[in-house]
Image (cartoon, rainbow, N blue to C red):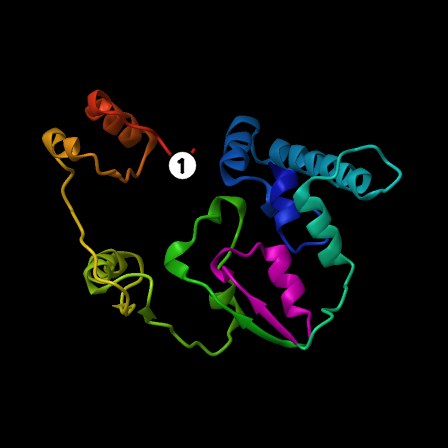
Amino acid sequence: SVLQRFLADDAEAPEPRHLPPDLAAALEERLGAARFRERRTWLLRRVTRLWHRIADPDDPTPLPHDGYLKLFAGAGHPAPARLLLIDEAQDIAPVSLGWLRRQSVQTILVGDPAQRIYGFRGAVDAMAASGHPEVRLTRSFRFGEEIAACARRVLRVLAPGAALLGAGRAGRVRSDPPARGQLDDGRPRAVLCRSNAGVVEAIIAYADVGVQGVGG
């Protein structure tokens, strides 16, 4: 919604860019340019009033989680520290990034741009947006070179040029789904799916040997 996009942003007030693009395009096509601008102004005023009510401690309007983050960032509180270490920096909301930029302490951002998952909520890659010098961690002790080799195939698409070395225990990787007969040895198996349709297909394919969907 417009309110959610505004809360995730570093802007002081709702702006036209906080309208979801698909909603803005649909309204402009249906109403025409002039009527759309009028309707957009009306909508932004309503969202502004709603935000004022949310921010008022004496108003019973509920305060969402993104709301108190917005209030904290807008209050200008300085960080009570000499060093800030920010993890998962590939998925920071612009409102948090704005607060970080206003700090006068040393800041270290840690994350992996290839693992961004909150772009749908307006999150941005704070590491790319910061302009800070970059140091890459390329050796992982969580897995061995077998899994690292498989991961590098994916990284060629998601993060061309990224280096990854497996320095942990050796492992095994299967790129083909096991046949049903191979599932009878009592060992657990996992099937990774890219879509809800893929989850349904996997459940149907392995229903006779027992299957459980995980991940929402």
Q: Is residue 68 placed above or below 107 in the rendered structure?
A: above
Horizontal placement of 78 versus 164: left or right?
A: right
The picture quadrant where one finds residue 186 is: top left
Nearer to us in this view, 160 or 36: 160
As helix, strand or loop, the secondary structure at mark 1 comes to loop
Residue 99 is covered by the magenta coloring: yes
Residue at 80% over, 44% down: 55
Residue at 33% over, 71% down: 138
The picture quadrant where one finds residue 180 is: top left
Q: Is residue 205 placed above or below 36 in the rendered structure?
A: above
The residue at which mark 1 appears reads as 215
Residue lying furthest front: 186
Nearer to us in this view, 116 or 41: 116
Nearer to us in this view, 115 or 70: 115
Q: Quadrant of the N terminus?
A: top right
Q: In the rendering, at what x and y percent does residue 19 appear? A: 59, 40
Nearer to us in this view, 42 or 141: 141
Q: In the rendering, at what x and y percent does residue 29 appear? A: 50, 30
Residue at 62% over, 39% down: 2
Q: Quadrant of the C terminus?
A: top left
Horizontal placement of 67 versus 207: left or right?
A: right
Q: In the rendering, at what x and y percent does residue 177 appear? A: 16, 38
Number of numbered discs overlaid on the protein picture: 1
Residue at 64% over, 62% down: 98
* Amino acid bearing label 1: Gly
Q: In the rendering, at what x and y percent does residue 84 appear? A: 62, 71
Q: Is residue 101 placed above or below 56 in the rendered structure?
A: below
State the extent of the magenta-drawn residues as a range.
83-104
Mark 1 is surrounded, within 10 Å at the Cα level, by few (under 14), some (14 to 19) or many (20 or more) other residues, namely few
Residue 75 is covered by the magenta coloring: no
